[in-house]
């Protein structure tokens, strides 16, 4: 069900990673915005960052929600991918934003950027991923990644661009041995 790879036909285009925050701690009595990651969440964030790095799939720009759990997930991946400090940006509208609000955030990405990752929350991240996926998913799992390659175009036109490749992955997903 989640082996959603389509061949990539173009050499250039926009690459979008929709990354849900890793597992957060519901036992801590704090405001939703301040919920930290669990130990499993931290480990899963590292696991997924390494997995993407080993696959040669690393975005150039990271945009994260202001929530601690999303920001911490983004920081872990930023560190594993050895990106410049300027590659990590906080975008408050990613915290519980609608699909349209998220698309507005993406539309503001400088056109020189060919790949970007957003870090945030369900249900809006699953809804946005399902907007592009050929096979819909029930949810983007914690620390899960939906990756999309679009034809050449602008971030402003992302919702209208031809999709050339799609892939969904998450920590517990069994991957084929290479």
Image (tube, rainbow, N blue to C red):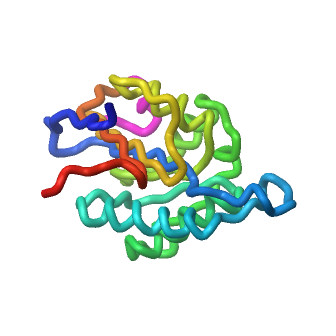
Considering the image in quadrants, where does the N terminus appear? top left
Q: Residue at x 49, y 58 (%)?
A: 62
Q: Residue at x 27, y 41 (%)?
A: 13
Residue nearest the observer in this picture, 22 or 177: 177
**Percent position of residue 94, x then y:** 64, 45
**Percent position of residue 164, x then y:** 24, 32
Q: Is residue 24 magenta?
A: no
Chain part drawn in magenta: 152-160
Q: Is residue 91 left or right of residue 83?
A: right
**Percent position of residue 100, x then y:** 60, 29
Number of disc labels: 0
Q: Is residue 157 magenta?
A: yes
Residue nearest the observer in this picture, 107 or 39: 39
Residue nearest the observer in this picture, 110 or 78: 78
Residue 50: image quadrant is bottom left
Res. 87 visible in picture: no
Q: Main secondary structure of the magenta part?
A: helix
Q: Is residue 80 left or right of residue 108?
A: left
Q: Residue at x 56, y 65 (%)?
A: 40
Q: Residue at x 20, y 33 (%)?
A: 6
**Percent position of residue 22, x then y:** 56, 57
Res. 65 visible in picture: yes
């Amino acid at each position: 069900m989640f082996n959603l790879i389509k061949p990539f036909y173009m050499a250039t285009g926009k690459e979008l990673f929709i990354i849900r925050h890793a597992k957060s701690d519901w036992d801590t009595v704090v405001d939703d915005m301040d919920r930290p990651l669990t130990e499993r969440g931290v480990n899963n964030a590292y696991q997924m960052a390494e997995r993407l790095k080993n696959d040669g799939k690393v975005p150039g720009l990271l945009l994260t929600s202001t929530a601690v759990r999303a920001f911490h997930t983004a920081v872990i991946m930023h560190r594993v991918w050895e990106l410049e400090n300027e590659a990590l940006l906080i975008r408050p509208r990613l915290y519980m934003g609608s699909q349209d609000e998220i698309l507005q955030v993406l539309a503001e990405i400088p056109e020189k950027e060919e790949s970007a990752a957003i870090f945030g929350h369900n249900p809006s991240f699953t809804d946005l991923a399902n907007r592009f996926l050929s096979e819909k998913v029930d949810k983007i799992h914690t620390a899960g990644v939906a990756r999309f390659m679009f034809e050449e175009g602008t971030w402003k036109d992302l919702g209208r661009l031809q999709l050339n490749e799609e892939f969904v992955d998450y920590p517990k997903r069994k991957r084929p041995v290479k």
